[in-house]
Each structure stands twice: as structure tokens, then as C-alpha cells.
Image (tube, grey):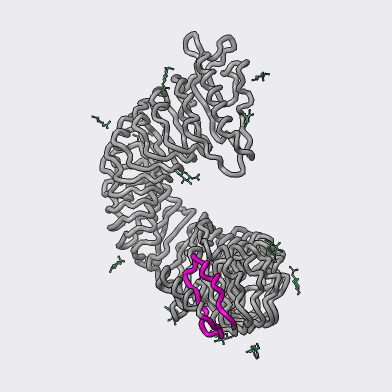
Amino acid sequence: MAKLSLPLLALSIFFSTSLCCPDDQKLALLRFKSSLLHTLNSSTQYSLFGLDSWNASSDCCHWDMVTCSSHSNSRKVVALQLYSLLLAEQPIPIPSMVLSPLSRIQSLMLLDISSNSIAGEIPASVFANLSKLVHLDMMQNNFSGSIPPQIFRLRYLQYLDMSSNSLEGVIAKEVGSLLNLRVLKLDDNSLGGYIPEEIGNLTKLQQLNLRSNHFVGRIPSSVLFLKDLEIMELRDNSLSMEIPKDIGDLTNLTTLALSDNRLTGGITSSIQKLHKLKILRLENNFLSGGIPTWLFDIKSLKDLFLGGNNLTWNNIVNLEPKCMLDQLSLSSCRLAGRIPDWILTQKDIVFLDLSKNKLQGPFPEWLAEMDIGSIFLSDNNLTGSLPPRLFRSESLSVLALSRNSFSGELPSNIGDAIKVMILVLSGNSFSGQIPKSISKIYRLILLDLSGNRFSGNIPDFRPNLLLAYIDFSYNELSGEIPVIFSQETRILSLGKNMFSGKLPSNLTDLNKLEHLDLHDNRIAGELPISLCQMSTLQVLDLRNNTLEGSIPSTINNLTNLRILDVSSNNLSGEIPAKLGNLVGMIDTPSTIKPVSDVFTFPIEFSDLIVNWKKSKQGLSSHSLEIYSLLDLSKNQFSGQLPATLGHLKALKLLNISYNHLSGKDTRNIRQSRESREPGLVT
Ligand SMILES: *[C@@H]1O[C@H](CO)[C@@H](O)[C@H](O)[C@H]1NC(C)=O
Ligand SMILES: *[C@@H]1O[C@H](CO)[C@@H](O)[C@H](O)[C@H]1NC(C)=O
Ligand SMILES: *[C@@H]1O[C@H](CO)[C@@H](O)[C@H](O)[C@H]1NC(C)=O
Ligand SMILES: *[C@@H]1O[C@H](CO)[C@@H](O)[C@H](O)[C@H]1NC(C)=O
Ligand SMILES: *[C@@H]1O[C@H](CO)[C@@H](O)[C@H](O)[C@H]1NC(C)=O
Ligand SMILES: *[C@@H]1O[C@H](CO)[C@@H](O)[C@H](O)[C@H]1NC(C)=O
Ligand SMILES: *[C@@H]1O[C@H](CO)[C@@H](O)[C@H](O)[C@H]1NC(C)=O
Ligand SMILES: *[C@@H]1O[C@H](CO)[C@@H](O)[C@H](O)[C@H]1NC(C)=O
Ligand SMILES: *[C@@H]1O[C@H](CO)[C@@H](O)[C@H](O)[C@H]1NC(C)=O
Ligand SMILES: *[C@@H]1O[C@H](CO)[C@@H](O)[C@H](O)[C@H]1NC(C)=O
Ligand SMILES: *[C@@H]1O[C@H](CO)[C@@H](O)[C@H](O)[C@H]1NC(C)=O
Ligand SMILES: *[C@@H]1O[C@H](CO)[C@@H](O)[C@H](O)[C@H]1NC(C)=O
């Protein structure tokens, strides 16, 4: 959490019992405590850590989180470690003005106020007074506005961490005055503009982290003279340039992370001079040209990420790496032929991403034996069946093999891989039954078997207590709709199979279900009234089954429903007026996270196919949360169309065609909807 190493070594701390902390400093600290309590008074659910010992009758040098120093006759407060002060169920924004009293403690050398959800502008006047600061940690708050120039006048500063806030604006040139700075972390803010040349003035800089901001332009040439620089993290900005040729002069670099920018050109040969380099991250740029083999001669290299560029692998077969990698990503690097067997020399590898290439041939037995933790081989043309050895791995936690040409049955020992959390085998030609042993994989969270030729009944998944994301769509599975999944189930996609029977009334047991897709099956009978108890449902797709009866009038109980598709069934009766009360279609909530955001690596769910503008279209799982639609077409609905449907303001699509509806209301609704959304089909 708080990084204390640097400055605490520099501080000389003497514990003296005879001397007390100055009254004005004690008063300032008590004021800080009371303004903090005052702020929190209206909030109920929180507990404050460590300020209990702060009371007027004791020596503040003995308070928790306070450190005093003594150089001459009087002791002074030199360090305040006020990180993570409160534990609350939800972060309570603390206004930044609570810091005001601290401006009286001019002797402060270390101030750590990280992880406190302090919000608002950085109070410039406070820091103007704290001119002796050596170490300032403000990370993980919600400071906004720009960085006040007063911060850049703290000339003794060695450590400055303002990462993970909401800071905006540019880094002022004045940053170049912080001549003692060793660590500068401004990552994960909304800073932008050019990175100032003046950073090159910070000749003692060892760490520069500007990741996840909006910086444009180039790496300043002056930065390339920072000989002590060990870590340069400029990931996730909008830098556009070639990698500077003289980056190789930064011979102390251990981390060079430039991924998720707009870098162009090739991988410059000067990188081979970085003989201490451990982490090289260049993925997701516009780099082009060949991948140089000398990269694998950098002995210290541990993590190499080159995917998502326009790089070319020259298919060197007899590569003899001198490095021993932990992580390797060569996604979309035009690897062709078989999975290269020099990977076998990388005994320590835990993460391997060779997705989006043109690899052919089988899943090699030697790769199965390497016990790798995460394997991404999606979007290649690999064939054959999976070696059973793969699932005897002690380490396998992620296996993503989507869109290849794998075939055959899944090995019956698949359940031996008990550490697997993510298993994505979609878009292959796997066949046979889903092996029962999968239920032994108790850590499984996501299982995507869609787009294969699996047949038969679904085994019991209730032992997979964490399984939340299930996609078995586009297979040949049959039997009644099973309710044999964990209570954690959020997504259940069983569309385009051969399921039959009625909709089970105990679907309600899945009380976290958000997305239920059963389209293109042979489900018959009526919609169970119990369906209306599933208030977590956001997406309900029952298109093209043989459902009959009417829509229960309690349907408006589904307050989170945004997508309802019951088209191409045999539903009849009137369309319930209460459909117009579906809250999720009136006001699309903006809080819903797309599933793809839940995982930190690239996971593609199958698109939700809907009839859209007279043709079938897939709504990507990445943006499903923005859609709201109601498709009642191709049924036997009769009577008048309820005018209440006009309330559904968030609807992007309303389709009621091919029913037996009557009445003038239809046209009115159509007109009012079309005036809002030009792409509407009725
Ligand atoms: C909180 O507010 C109440 C009145 O609303 C007051 O009586 C109480 O002293 C306050 N507590 C603190 C810690 O300020
Ligand atoms: C003040 O805190 C000290 C410990 O730091 C404790 O011994 C003392 O009892 C406290 N006094 C009051 C009035 O709470
Ligand atoms: C700075 O500290 C001095 C001395 O304690 C004090 O007089 C002054 O008010 C402080 N400035 C601010 C802005 O708090
Ligand atoms: C941070 O503050 C901004 C306003 O400056 C606000 O929009 C945002 O919701 C806050 N974020 C958090 C996590 O509190
Ligand atoms: C940068 O350093 C040079 C001396 O090396 C100095 O003249 C200049 O004022 C510094 N710039 C800033 C902004 O501090
Ligand atoms: C590497 O850093 C050390 C200090 O950490 C420094 O003494 C040395 O000069 C640097 N190396 C080069 C080649 O500049
Ligand atoms: C990728 O590089 C090839 C040459 O290797 C070039 O023909 C092609 O236009 C580049 N594609 C993009 C999108 O830059
Ligand atoms: C995939 O490989 C098979 C032979 O193994 C070949 O017939 C097929 O054309 C390949 N498909 C693509 C898209 O390269
Ligand atoms: C739901 O009911 C079916 C029989 O209709 C039963 O096989 C299944 O175990 C039930 N599921 C749950 C979770 O109770
Ligand atoms: C409806 O589903 C059946 C299989 O149950 C399929 O044969 C038919 O093509 C589907 N109709 C449409 C319009 O997709
Ligand atoms: C409405 O939903 C709640 C759960 O949110 C449920 O308890 C209640 O039974 C439902 N009412 C109807 C009529 O389905
Ligand atoms: C649809 O329902 C009607 C009665 O409402 C019935 O006559 C008809 O046979 C049903 N059609 C199908 C395909 O189930």
C-alpha cells in the first residue's frame, strides 16, 4: 500500500520522552481529526482506523500514524501515515479541504494520504506550506482538477505518487524543478497534452509511470538522458511516434512499457542494448516489420508482449532463446505453421498468448506437458482433439481455444484440471456429450462451449459453485431445459439447440440470472408466471420456440429487463398494458457492466442475434448494455396495442409485426417512437 522505504531511511528519528510535540502541531492534527469526523457524521456505515489515540491530553508524538523527530530542543512532526483511514461499505467522498489544518505542520517530510477517497481539487495553499516534503503519496483518492504548481515547488521531493485519481490538464513545465525526484507516478488519471521536455531535468529519476492518461505526441528526447531510469511505463495513452533509436541509452531500464498507444515503425535495434530489461510491453500499437530474434537474446527478459500490432514473425524454426520467459504474447504476429517448439525451452512460462495467428496442426503433446497457467490459442486453424495430458495440469487456469478447427470428444478427464477458472472452446467442431467430470472443476467461473456439435443432455453443473457465465448455444443439445446450475449463474445461453419440454418453473432458483437466452429451440407450453419473479433478468430471448398462452400481466415486475424477444412463437391474447411499465426500457440504466469488462483478458461472448432493421444482426457482448428492445412479432397477439408502450423511451427497437392487432393506437406509437429513433421497425 504505502511505500515508505525511500524517505523513512532518510529521516532521522529519535524517540525522546522528555520532549512533546509543539502545541500548534497538535492542535492542527486535532483539527484535522475533527473536520474528518464532521464530514463523516452524516454517513452511517464506516469505521475510522487509528485516530482513537489522537486526544488532547496526550503527546501527539505518541499517537498512531504520527512520527516526530528531534534535531534541536523541540520535537516536530515529520511523518504522517494517514493511508486507508476509513473502512466503509461504499467509498465516502471526503472533501479535500479536510487537509487544510495540515498546512500548519511545516516540518512534515512524509505525508501519505493514499486510499482515502478524498475528492475535489488539491488544496494548493496546503502544499505551498509543506516545503520540507520528501515523500508525498496521494494515490487512490479522487482528486480532480489540475496539478497545482505549488506541488512542483516542493524542491526536496524524492517521491511523488498521485496515481489513480481524476486529475486533468497537462503536466506543467515546472515539474522540471523537482530535481531530487526519484519516483514520479501519475498513472491512471485524465492528464493529457504533451509530456514536457522538462522531465529530462529530473536526472535522479528511477521510475516514471504515466500509464492510463491521454498523453499525445512523443516521448521527450530529454527523457532519454535519464541514466538512472529503471521503469518507464507510458502504457495506455495516445502517443504517436516511432520508438526512439536512443532508447537504448537508458541502460538501467528494467521495464519498458509502451503498450496501448499509437506507436509506428519497427522494433528498433537499440532495444538490444537494454541488457537489464525484464519487461518489454509493446502490444496494441501500430508497429510493423519483422520481430527481431535478438529480443530472445536479452537474458534478463521475463515478460514479452508484442501482440496487436502489424508485426511479422519470420517463422524461424530453430530459435535458441537465451531468455527464460514468464509471459509471452505473440498474438496477431502472423505466426504460421505448427506451434513453434522453441517454446519448449521456456520452462518457466505461465502465460502464453498465440491467438489470432495462422497456426495449424494439432495441440502439441509437449505443450500440454508444460503445465502453463494461461493458454490463449483462439483464432488459429488448429486441428485434432485435445490431449488428455493438458487436463492433468497442476496450473491450468485459463484455456481459450475459440475459432479453431479442433474436433473429437472432450477428454473424459477434463475434470482433473481443477484449477481452471475460464474455459472457452467456442467455434470448433467438438462433438459428443459434455463430459460429466467438468462438474469437478469447482473454481470454474466461465464456460463457453458454443458453436460446436455437442449433443445429448447437459450434465449436472450444480457442484460448480462459482460458475456464472455459461454459453452452450449453437450445439445439438437436447432434453428438457435443465435447472442444474449454480446459484451464481448470471448468463445462461442455450439458444439454437434442440431443447424441448416446458419452461421449468424452478428457473427462479437462479436468483442472480441476468441473461437467459433460449432462442431457436423447441420449448412448448405457457410462460410460467414464476418467470416474473426473476427481477434480476436483463435479457430474455425466447425467439422461435412453440410457446403459447399469453404474456403474464405481472411482467412489469421484471424491472431490469431491457431486451425481451418472444418473436416467432404462438403467443396469443392481448399485449398486457403493464409492458409499458418496464422500468429498464424506460430509462436504460448506465451502471450495467458488459461481461467483457468483468475479465481482464480478451473474452468474446457470442453475439446476441436479433432481428434488426429487417435482417438478423448480432449485438456484441461488448456493448449489449446499451441496447433496449422489445420484439413481439410473429405471434398470435390480438386486440389493441396498449398506448402505454409509448412510455418505453429507452427502446431502440419495437417490433409488433405479424400479429392480429387492431386499432389506431398502433400508428400513433409507431410515429412517436420513430420520431425518437429513426431505425425503428414496426
Ligand atoms: C453528529 O451530528 C449530531 C447532530 O446531527 C451531533 O449531535 C453529533 O455530536 C455529531 N457527531 C460528531 C462526531 O460530530
Ligand atoms: C488519550 O490517549 C492516551 C493514549 O494515547 C490514553 O492513554 C488516554 O487515556 C487518552 N485520554 C483520553 C481522555 O481519552
Ligand atoms: C503556513 O504556516 C504558517 C505557520 O504555521 C501559518 O501562519 C500560515 O497560516 C500557513 N499557511 C496556510 C495557507 O495555512
Ligand atoms: C470522482 O469525482 C468525479 C467528479 O470530479 C465524479 O464524477 C466521480 O464519480 C468520482 N469518482 C468516484 C469513484 O467517486
Ligand atoms: C532544467 O534544468 C536546467 C539546468 O539543467 C535549468 O536551467 C532549467 O531552469 C530547468 N528547468 C526547469 C523547468 O526547472
Ligand atoms: C544506473 O544507475 C545507477 C544508480 O542506480 C548509476 O550509478 C549508474 O550510473 C547508472 N548506469 C548508467 C549506465 O548510467
Ligand atoms: C501491415 O503491414 C503490411 C506490410 O507488412 C502492409 O502491407 C499493411 O498495409 C499493414 N497493415 C496495416 C493495417 O497497417
Ligand atoms: C485450415 O486447415 C485445413 C487443413 O488442416 C485446411 O483445409 C483449411 O483450408 C484451413 N483453413 C484456413 C481458414 O486456413
Ligand atoms: C428443477 O426441477 C427439475 C425437475 O422439474 C429438477 O430435476 C431440478 O433438480 C430442479 N432444480 C433445482 C435447482 O431445484
Ligand atoms: C426456428 O427454429 C427451427 C428449429 O427449431 C429452425 O428449423 C428454423 O429455421 C427456425 N426459424 C427461423 C426463422 O430461424
Ligand atoms: C416480483 O418480484 C419480487 C422479487 O423482486 C418477488 O418477490 C415477487 O413475488 C414478484 N411478484 C410477482 C407477482 O411475480
Ligand atoms: C397456435 O395456437 C393456436 C390456438 O391459439 C392453435 O390453433 C395452433 O395450432 C397453434 N399453432 C402451433 C404451430 O402450435
The answer to if 661 sits in the magenta stretch is yes
- The residue lying toward the viewer, choosing from 21 and 303, is 21
Eyeballing the image, is 228 above or below 499?
A: above
- On the image, the x and y values in percent for residue 350 come to 53, 56
Which quarter of the figure has residue 532? Answer: bottom right
Extent of the magenta region: 639-663
Height in image: 584 above or below 123?
A: below
Q: Is residue 452 visible?
A: no
Q: Residue at x 36, y 35 (%)?
A: 205
**Residue plotted at (44% across, 29% down):** 135
Instruction: Kindly tell me whether residue 260 is visible in this rendering.
Output: yes
Closer to us: 417 or 587: 587
User: Splitting the image into 4 quarters, where does residue 227 fall?
Assistant: top left
- Report x, y in % for residue 509: 71, 65
Residue 632: quarter of image? bottom right
Quick one: 204 or 470, which is closer to the camera? 470
In the image, residue 342 lies in the stretch drawn in magenta = no
Q: Position of residue 540 (x, y in %)?
A: 59, 71
| Residue at (40% x, 67% y) in the render | 317
